[in-house]
Amino acid sequence: MAKTPSPFRPLSINVLTVSDTRGIAEDTSGEALINMLQDAGHTLGERAIVKDDVYAMRAVVSNWIADDSAHVVLITGGTGFYSRDSTPEAILPLLDKEVDGFGELFRQISYEEIGTSTIQSRALAGLANKTLIFCLPGSTGACKTAWNGIIQEQLDARHRPCNFVTMLLGPYQPPVHEV
């Protein structure tokens, strides 16, 4: 018996912008992520902007990963090497598992766009309480690179040979038609 192909399954995705200088009006990276996730058929759960402070980030993300309705968290900003960049330090202790290949692949794809400057990105991803978290650089271009080059396919149940949707939502159960 042939396996029923998985249909697209929309996810609830929260977006967090980490910035000491941006408000909603200046948050082009957060806005780009929201537009891309919605264009792909997903739903924006919540959006927040916090200062580049380890404990402020942990507070927001901890609440989101404790909420069963949040499937994915996209974080933009704070992944560089400036003294205030602390997103990896804030998020790593919350993760149950790291997705090691994400940062590696992001830097490989980014190299084609920005050359060796990509080594200054500490982009990372991981799972926490069945919530997938991506930490992206704060530039709009980097967010588009990550979404278009990696994240969009990994959040689509139709992508083969594997994606994260089953881990987040459980196996697909085709509807039962009563006769």
Image (cartoon, helix red, strand yellow):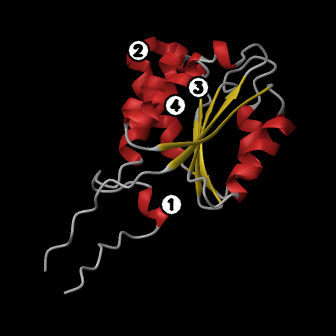
Residue at (59% x, 61% y) in the render: 130
Mark 4–mark 3 CB contact (< 8 Å): yes
Mark 4 and mark 3: Cα distance apart in space: 6 Å
Residue 165 position, x and y percent, is 43, 57
Instruction: Give the SS element for disc 4.
Output: helix
Mark 3 vs mark 2, foreground winner is 3
* Disc ID at residue 34: 4
Instruction: Give the SS element for disc 1.
Output: helix
Q: Is residue 176 left or right of residue 37?
A: left
Mark 2–mark 4 CB contact (< 8 Å): no
Which residue in the rendered view is the most extreme toward the front? 179
Residue at (48% x, 17% y) in the render: 141
Whether residue 118 is situated above or below residue 99 in the rendered picture: above
Q: Quadrant of the N terminus?
A: bottom left
Residue type marked 4: Ile
Mark 2 or mark 4: which comes first in sequence? Answer: 4
In the picture of the structure, the residue carrying the numbered disc 2 is: 113
Mark 3 or mark 2: which comes first in sequence? Answer: 3
Q: Is residue 141 left or right of residue 173?
A: right
* Disc ID at residue 30: 3
Instruction: Give the SS element for disc 3.
Output: helix
Whether residue 171 is situated above or below residue 145 in the rendered picture: below
Residue type marked 1: Leu
In the picture of the structure, the residue carrying the numbered disc 1 is: 168
Choose between 1 and 64: the one closer to the eye. Answer: 64
Residue type marked 2: Glu
Mark 1 and mark 2: Cα distance apart in space: 31 Å
Residue 92 position, x and y percent, is 71, 45
Q: Quadrant of the C terminus?
A: bottom left
Mark 2 and mark 4: Cα distance apart in space: 22 Å
